[in-house]
Amino acid sequence: MKDYSRREALKLAAAGAAVLAGGSNVLFAAKEAPLVKPVKNVRIALQLYSVRRSCGKDFDKVLAGVAKMGYSGVEFAGYHKYGKDPKALKKRLDDLGLVAACTHIGTGSFTNPKNIQKTIDFHKTIGCKYLVAPGDGSFCHPERSKKLADDFNKAAEALKKVGMACGYHNHSREMKKAAGETTKSWFDLFAERTCQDVVLQQDVGWTVHAGADPVAFIKRYPGRYKVQHFKPTMVKGKGTRSIIGEDSVPWKEVITASYDVGGAEWFTIEQESYLKGKSDMECSEMSLVGLKKILKAMGKSCK
């Protein structure tokens, strides 16, 4: 599989890749919210986009460093030298005691009939269950957004049969009010139009950046936040620096909701702001330490 950057993934998705034929747009808003049992253990992964500069220099060294920090898993944003060798990548992860928690790939990788089997085969091999699109140009479009939701529903149905799932990762624009709506955001519309099997990978940092409440989204769509993004984020007047526990995100409230009703399996740290004099690896480790400190203080179990 071809390695690509986050920006390239967004371009790929926005290009409007071919989608599964047939089907209809179905609104799921009328469904009763599912009963979600509180989770007991959540694992912590690192989105490797956080350390993309280091990955470009020595990917194997980065994986070893991430494992040494104490992360349980990684979320991919490209596979570097392993793009055509999933077996070797799985061995590397196993040797380091890491799990492929999730991956960020273009929407067409799992909605296009020509691509989906190849995508399934690669990610089955590396043990990666969750396939998440890190953006799509149709998501915030008045008309195309309906078709996009339908594509995700059909992909989710196909992936569920092989023990996998697809999902969507937001930035700030998706949390803004949707065109023609008085209260609902684009994220709300997508959640309502997609079935329970479509994962909502909320990036709580981007949600806070958009001026929205990440906790409210978790409670509104329970059980759908299997691999939530924990991005340290600063907003004016709150926090001191962009490290988890020192920033502007209400972490205790987010964590409580994630355990109680979010259905969390992974908390995936994404570090996109770096302290002066500190490397991407160092800042990623600092946020891990910060998150574990909060979890310990709350009496929450994590791996």
Image (spheres, rainbow, N blue to C red):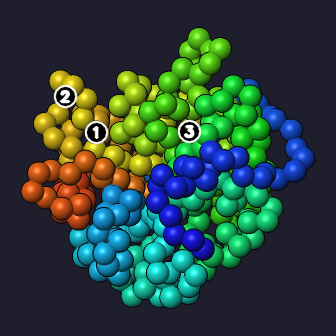
Q: Which of the labelled discs sits on residue 143, or is there none?
A: none
Percent position of residue 45, x then y: 38, 62
Q: Nearer the viewer, mark 1 or mark 3?
A: 1
Name the residue carrying label 3: 222
Residue lying at the far top in this picture: please name it: 182
Check disc 1 and report its element: helix, strand or loop: loop
Q: Amino acid at mark 2?
A: Lys
Name the residue carrying label 1: 233
Q: Is residue 236 left or right of residue 133?
A: left
Q: Is residue 36 left or right of residue 100?
A: right
Residue lying at the far left in this picture: please name it: 277
Q: Which of the labelled discs sits on residue 238, or is there none?
A: 2
Tell me the crowding category of disc 2: few under 14, some 14 to 19, or many 20 or more residues within 10 angstroms, Cα based. few
Rounded to the nearest angstrom, the CA distance separating label 1 from label 3 is 24 Å
Percent position of residue 281, x then y: 23, 65
Work out whether mark 3 precedes mark 2 in sequence or the reverse, and give the earlier one: 3
Q: Is residue 193 left or right of residue 301?
A: right
Work out whether mark 1 precedes mark 3 in sequence or the reverse, and give the earlier one: 3
Tell me the crowding category of disc 1: few under 14, some 14 to 19, or many 20 or more residues within 10 angstroms, Cα based. many
Image-quadrant location for residue 57: bottom left
Q: Residue at x 68, y 76 (%)?
A: 121
Tell me the crowding category of disc 3: few under 14, some 14 to 19, or many 20 or more residues within 10 angstroms, Cα based. many
Q: Amino acid at mark 3?
A: Pro
Q: Nearer the viewer, residue 161 or 242?
A: 242
